[in-house]
Amino acid sequence: MNRLTTSTIALVLAAGTAGMVQSQEALDSEIGTYSGVVDNELSDRFIRAENIIGADIYTQYMEYDEAAWGETDFYEEIDTDWEEIGEVSDIVISRDGTIVGVIAEIGGWLDIGDSDVVIDIADLKTVGGTAGDNYGDLSLVTPLSQEQLESRQEVDSGWW
């Protein structure tokens, strides 16, 4: 009887362990086994933070078309009707790693009188810049006006 119990326990443990390994493999494939793996074919999809921080921000408020905004992932070049309203000073990331948006310096002149506000990532599109030029001419555009952004709560270093 003791021998049967030991064999049964060993069989149950082996089956349970195999199930755990299989579950872990399935879990790894779901969460992103290839996290951090970048190859040349994918490199043109990624933009480094250093290329975003300092980028100019434009508004297309006067000619904003909600349908066109939703259909466009990015813009190739700055439209002549857009107005430059600020620049990116930082990137905001949530605790779970999701990019929330950017902190933008809006308005002012030579860093005098500008407002630091958060612009949600859904309200931004990239403009220009290519992987070939290391995204050197990258800018961002928003459908929000300078006045709408300036009316938001400021998030200077004391706010954090």
Image (cartoon, rainbow, N blue to C red):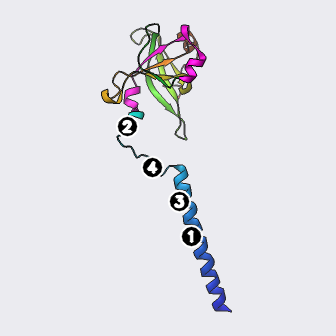
Per the model, the C-alpha gap separating discs 2 and 4 is 14 Å
Three-letter code, disc 1: Ala
**Picture quadrant of residue 61:** top right
Residue 144, horizontal then vertical, whole percent: 56, 15
- Residue 18 disc label: 1
Q: Are marks 3 and 4 in contact (CB under 8 Å)?
A: no
Per the model, the C-alpha gap separating discs 2 and 3 is 27 Å
Residue 124 to residue 5: above or below: above
Disc 4 is placed on an element classified as: loop
Sequence order check, earlier mark of 2 and 1: 1
Sequence order check, earlier mark of 3 and 1: 1
Residue 62, horizontal then vertical, whole percent: 55, 7
Query: Left or right: where does residue 111 sit relative to residue 4?
Result: left
* Residue occupying image coordinates x 35% and y 30%: 131
Three-letter code, disc 4: Tyr
Per the model, the C-alpha gap separating discs 3 and 1 is 11 Å
- Residue 25 disc label: 3
Residue 21, horizontal then vertical, whole percent: 54, 65
Q: Which residue is mark 2?
A: 43
* Residue occupying image coordinates x 47% and y 29%: 91
Q: Which residue is mark 4?
A: 34
Residue 141 lies in the magenta stretch: no
Q: Which residues are magenta?
A: 46-71
For disc 4, the neighbor class at 10 Å (few under 14, some 14 to 19, many from 20) is: few
In front of the other: 104 or 99 = 99
**Picture quadrant of residue 8:** bottom right
* Residue occupying image coordinates x 47% and y 24%: 74
Outermost residue on the left side: it is: 133
Per the model, the C-alpha gap separating discs 2 and 1 is 37 Å
